[in-house]
Amino acid sequence: MPEILLHSKYLSGVPAGRKNGARIAQKTEKSDEKEEKQFDFSRKIRELRLELEIKKREEERIEKDIVIILEENTIDGGEQNRSFGLAVTRLNNHMLVVENSAKQLTSALKNISSLADTISGRVSALDVAKTRVVGCLQLAGDMKDLGHCAEGIDDAIRSEDFEIASQHIHRFLTLDEAVFQIREFKQKDATDSIRHSYEILSSAKDRLSKILKSRLTEAVQKGDIAEMQRFVKLFPLIHESDEGLQRYSVFLNQKIDKLADENLAVGFSVKNSPKNVETMRRKGKNEKLIMKAGGTDDNRRNVLYADTLFMFFEGVAEIIETNLPVLEHSYGMEKLLDFMFILQARIDEFFRRLLEEFDTRRRLSHLNRLVDDVIHKQKSAAPEHSEDVPDALEIDAIASEICMMNSSVEMYWRFISRRIGKNNKDTLGEKSGNDEEEETEEARLERQRLRKEAKDQKMDQLLNRSRVGTKMQELIGNYCRLEHFYMLKSVQKAIKSDAKEDVGGLTSSLIDDVVFIIRKSIRRAAGSGNVDSVCATINNATALLDTVIHSSLHHNIQSGYVTSANFASEAFTAYQQGKQVKEAAESQKEQFLLAVNNSAKLSELLIELQKGLISEWSGIKRPLVEKNKLEHSTTQIEESAKKLSALAKHGVEELFKSAFKTKIRQGADPYQNIDRQMTMQDVEYFEAHDPFMENYLAQIDRLLVENEPHLFPDNYQTILLFTAAEIARQIEGSIAKCQFNRYGALQLDREYRQICAYLTNVAGWSAREKVARLGQVCDVLMIIVALLNVETIEEAMEVWHNSKTMTTSSTTRTLSLPEVRKVLSLRADFPTVAIKSIE
């Protein structure tokens, strides 16, 4: 009976073990039914009791299972329980010991912390005491030094031992201010002593300053270098560095002025007539100075001002190098830069006088105006008057002299930068070493950075903002304009005087002249030491190549190549102009070939020029910015070379259209008249005597042989490519009009190989790499020949798929499926249905 009830229980409502939520949900549902009918609680109680009984039975069953499992898996359960209990007891005892030890450790740490706080307070107090003791000792030492200085200063001044006196004053000026604040206390004896020493040293400082100034001024007037160097080193000790530099600079400025007058006198005297110069040489007056500047050498007269500037800067560098060590140790880098600013004023004055004389004697301003007018008229295509055009040779000489002047200035600036830069590095190292213990690494680096920025700013002010720097930049701007004019007029003259080199020459004199002019101008600009002028010169040179030279060559190419086809029109034009017809045609043909060859040769020489310039400049150390500028400028030469190469290719294409294309097409016309459905006897006959291919290749060979001596090698390789492409195109078109069988396809394959062998042999081994595109040009024809030489449709499809797989170049064209079907339809022995079913 319970089994039946249990079964009915599981089949109804909520199973045993269901969560309370499900039971509550079921109770809720049944509570809704209670409203309609009465619920029997006795039945519910019975069900609950039955469920309780079931749970008890399950519990008993589970306990029995646990006992059975334990009996099966353990041999002696009681012994294990006892061992486990003992282990737990031992662990409990150990934990008690650990707890007691932790309490003891906590107590000890509290005591140690208290002792550490006490010791730390005492150490802090000791540090404060130590600091105060050190301060007192320092103060006592300063007071002792103050008294010692006060006692010895008067004796040192009276005995003219100014070095010792300056050291006393320096020690007095570097004492801590706390020494003089003792006067505020009520220690009368100490206060009186300090006040007395202070008054003595202050008075002695003023007296010593006056003595040093007067002695240094007197030494400058007498030119006593030893006395000057003795006294100038003492001014930093009495904190009057600016005064010492200012007075010492009077002597150096006098030497610079004297040097300037000597060099300018040399320059001016040389501008006298040769008769006066010869008179001076006979008299022996100023001969040494004149020879020093190269004035009596006629070969140096065109660079007289550059030589004068070079000699002046060489003398200034010698003056600075001689006197710099005196100031280097005593004044430091910052004051050294200030000293250079004082000297730079006299150098600027000399440079101003030199430029005025240079502008007057070389007529620089006048030439600049004329050059501007000529360039403006050149751009606006206005006519030029010969009397207003400067002489290119005169411009050439002035441009060279300006470059030499800038080279001297750049050399002088490098000397100043290197000399003062070295001093800057040493000074920074010394100061960082002295203050290393008193400042953090971060503060030291920040201080060095600020010092370097200030130094760089001063150097920029000295090099680029001085009169020498600004005027030289203006002069370089004038040079770029003059150089542009020189290249323009020289190129125009080269075009006018263009002539063929010799009877068998392929190019004219224009190419060598243009390359020589451009190379000369670029290297002259590079010799100036100014990278911006080099970039400007390259830019102007490439502009001339892209405009004047390109236009001249393009004009001759556009005139066309005279052949028998267009001879009538050219003859009529020559007749109208009153020229001999034959001479006009030959002249036009020669000009065309010269223009094509000149374009190719000039492109090749420009690439060589670019590589040569890069090789020359790679060994020179330059800043990264300047290297990038030069690299970008040289790429402009390469771009101009590419444009000329494209022009040469265009000319070769025009030559091919005029002299080759029509003859190649006419020679290929008989090909389609040959019956291609051959027998074995026909194939053997064609192998012994080909009625078409031998004549066709002979015609092409005559064309190539006639034109090869007149073409530059690169142009000849280009004409070979055009010829190969046209042959492939004509043969391909003729093949499309023929019907083949298996033997006809074999003959076609033989003819194709004969054409490729001929073109490869014509190219030659030396030019094999340049004409490697011959195979690419004939790729489509090769695929067509291969498709026509198959025996079955399946083999044709395999050949086609292999051709697509082997084609790696994106520029090589392959046959599409409709084209394959069209080619296979040329085989008369292939079924049309099978060809159409190809997929």
Image (cartoon, rainbow, N blue to C red):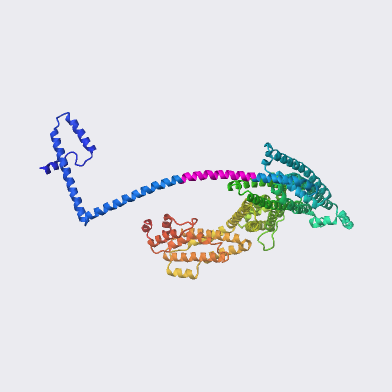
- Residue 481 falls within the magenta-colored stretch: no
Q: Quadrant of the C terminus?
A: bottom left
Q: Nearer the viewer, residue 631 or 800?
A: 631
Return the x and y of residue 279 as percentages of the image width and height: 89, 55
Residue in view at x 19 percent, y 41 percent? 16
- The part of the image, by quadrant, that contains residue 618 is bottom right
Give coordinates of residue 354: x percent, y percent.
78, 48
Left or right of residue 431, residue 37 in this image: left
Report which quarter residue 619 is drawn in.
Answer: bottom right
Asked whether 452 or 113 is in front, the reply is: 113
Q: Is residue 128 magenta?
A: yes
The answer to whether residue 338 shows anywhere in this view is no
- Residue ranking furthest to the top: 35
Q: Is residue 293 above or below residue 194?
A: below
Q: Picture quarter containing residue 518?
A: bottom right
- Quadrant in which the N terminus is drawn: top left
Left or right: 614, with 9 as reference point: right
- How far from the left and from the top, in percent, is residue 330? 72, 50
Task: Find the magenta span and give its range.
Answer: 112-136
Whether residue 218 is visible to the viewer of this picture, yes or no, is yes
Majority secondary structure in the magenta region: helix
Who is closer to the viewer here, 310 or 130? 130
